[in-house]
Amino acid sequence: MKLSIAPMPYFWPRERTVAFYREAAEWPVDILYLGETVCSKRRELRTRDWIDLAHDLADRGKEVVMSTLALIEAESEVAVVRRLAENGHCWIEANDVTAVQICRERGIPFVGGPSLNIYNHVTLRRLVDDGMRRWVAGTEHSRDLVAAIHTAIRSDGEEPPSLEVFAHGRLSLAWSARCFTARAFDIAKDHCGFRCIEHPDGLALATRDGRPFLRVNGIQIQSEAVVDMSPEVPDLRSLGVDVLRLSPQAEGMAAIVSHFDLARRESRALPPIGVRNGYWHGEPGMPGVPPRQP
């Protein structure tokens, strides 16, 4: 069982981003996903910078995958995907069907990202035919759904692709062409002033009565709670999960990696350092909150 660092969902200054991956090169992780998946306006690192960083990390023994935007809206964004696909050095994580098509046309193996809509074995098999070699299950997928898809694939006499599961971090819940962060500050998306960079773990959003609820991250909405699947590691292994995905966060990432490295090496359930993922168990993603007493 391998560990991966998911593509960075937040907008950090260039120096902080480079420092993060410099540290990550020393952690016991096997796979590093690089690139911008949320907003094409975030350009502290440009495409050439990401490719150069990928080469450096690969030279240091890491498997590197270049991730694409989850919502591709412009020809300029398509051009970036083409450039990533043509670098010839790394696999691509396709988070949009446009990226799938570009990889298919070029015969490039790719990782099916969590924002692809894969809910049955027919879709999964079609993407495997297109070149998908690893599938990152959606954060809303349940264990039973993943198991059913794999069972259906095997019943057709085929082997499913390598499976990666989101194991730690804030869940991605929604995407929109509209920028939630800009809206929070009552400014236009095209003149946002890059306010995301002021919130290295997303902008906290509370309910009207002050309860922590969500995180606003540009065009993405995340859960407020940090999900932790480390107690599920033995079951994940029995299910055939090949990779545990850890999402970058501003503080304490080295300790999180160490926690999951211990869990996978000893194949035992460790005390959680986050909350339970209800979706994985076919339940609401967030536990019910009792009404506040007057």
Image (spheres, rainbow, N blue to C red):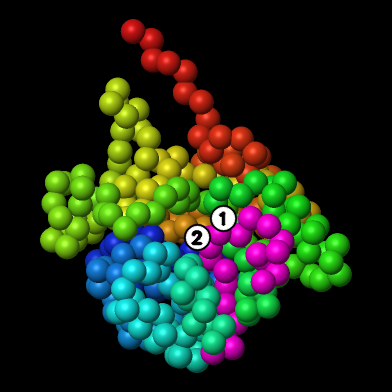
Q: Quadrant of residue 129?
A: bottom right
x, y percent for residue 255: 49, 54
Query: Which residue is under mark 2?
Result: 115
Q: Which label number is shown at residue 190?
A: none
Relative to 276, residue 104 above or below: below
Query: Which residue is under mark 1?
Result: 138
Q: Are marks 1 and 2 in contact (CB under 8 Å)?
A: yes
* Residue 263 appears in the rendering: yes
State which quarter of the image contains the C terminus: top left
Of residues 255 and 81, the one drawn nearer to the viewer in this rendering: 81
* Residue 65 appears in the rendering: no
x, y percent for residue 9: 38, 60
* Residue type at numbered disc 1: Gly
Name which residue lies at 39% across and 73% down.
Answer: 35
Of residues 248 and 255, the one drawn nearer to the viewer in this rendering: 248
Horizontal side of residue 61 vs 231, given as left or right:
left
Is residue 117 rendered magenta in the image?
yes
Q: Which residues are magenta?
A: 106-126
Name which residue lies at 21% across and 44% down.
Answer: 184
Marked residue nearer the N-terminal end (1 or 2):
2
Horizontal side of residue 56 vs 141, given as left or right:
left
Relative to 128, residue 103 above or below: below
Q: Quadrant of residue 131?
A: bottom right
Residue furthest out toward the top: 294
Q: Secondary structure at mark 2?
A: loop
Of residues 249 and 91, the one drawn nearer to the viewer in this rendering: 91
Is residue 178 rendered magenta in the image?
no
* Residue type at numbered disc 2: Ser
